[in-house]
Each structure stands twice: as structure tokens, then as C-alpha cells.
Image (cartoon, grey):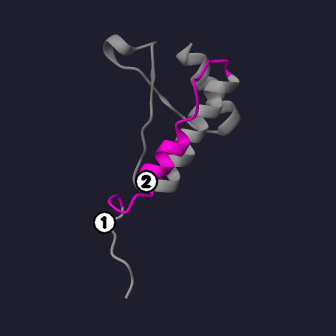
Amino acid sequence: MPTAVRRLIYERFDMSLGTGLGKMKGRMFRIGHLGDCNDLMLLATFAGCEMGLRLAGVPLKGSGLPAAMNWLSEPAQAAGLKLAD
């Protein structure tokens, strides 16, 4: 199933996901990135995975996107950002 889901996500959303490694090979997929990754890129990646899983018929109890958005928008997560004066 992970291979079919990865293929569907790649063909539909042009998003490439890695395969599971070692004992997890064939049982999961991995999210990776090359270079810069910001909050919006991360949310888009989660959305692509979630939409792909739904399109593949994987039953999901709900969406993780609202929780990720809430966590990323908390002031503590932005504490390291320097605002312009």
C-alpha cells in the first residue's frame, strides 16, 4: 500500500516521498526535504500526504492539518523569529 500511495501522491501532486528503511520498508513512507523548509512548506507537505491518503482510500479518523496549524502558529514556536523594528 505505501508504494501505491507514494505513486498516487507523486502523480497527482508532484510530491516525491521516500520509502521506509530497514524493517519499515514497504510499511511506511518518509517525508524529506532538500535545503530550506518553512512552516508553509511543511503544511503543504502534510496536506499533500493527507489528500493522497484519502484519495487512496486509506481511512483517516480526521485531519492533522488543524493541529499542525495551531502548533505552528503558537507564539512559542515563533519565539526564535526576529521581528523587524
Magenta-highlighted stretch: main secondary structure? Answer: loop
**Residue type beneath disc 2:** Leu
Instruction: Indicate whether 17 appears above or below 43.
Output: above
Determine whether, in the image, residue 4 is placed left or right of residue 17: right
In the picture as drawn, the residue positioned furthest to the left comes out as 80
Does residue 37 appear anywhere in the picture? no
Residue 58 among those drawn in magenta: yes
Q: Which residue is mark 1?
A: 79
Instruction: Tell me what residue is drawn at x 54 percent, y 35 percent.
Output: 16
Crowding at label 2, few (<14), some or many (≥20) Cα neighbours within 10 Å? some
**Residue 82 point in image, percent of width and height:** 33, 75
Q: Quadrant of residue 4?
A: top right
Query: What secondary structure is found at the residue carrying circle 1?
Result: loop
Query: Is residue 65 depicted above or below 11 in this figure?
Result: below
User: Of helix, strand and loop, which one carries label 2?
Assistant: helix
Asked whether 50 or 4 is in front, the reply is 50
Residue stretch in magenta: 56-77
First in sequence: mark 2 or mark 1?
2
**Amino acid at the residue labelled 1:** Ala
Q: Nearer the viewer, residue 38 or 15?
A: 38
Percent coordinates x, y for residue 62 in the rendering: 58, 30
The picture places residue 54, in percent across and down from the top left corner, at: 66, 26
- The image shows residue 41, relative to residue 14, as above or below, that is below
Q: With 23 as the anchor, is 31 left or right in this view?
A: right
Horizontally, is 85 left or right of 50 in the view?
A: left
Residue carrying label 2:
72
x then y, percent, for residue 1: 57, 12
Examine the structure image and report whether residue 60 is included in the region drawn in magenta: yes
Q: Residue furthest bottom?
A: 85
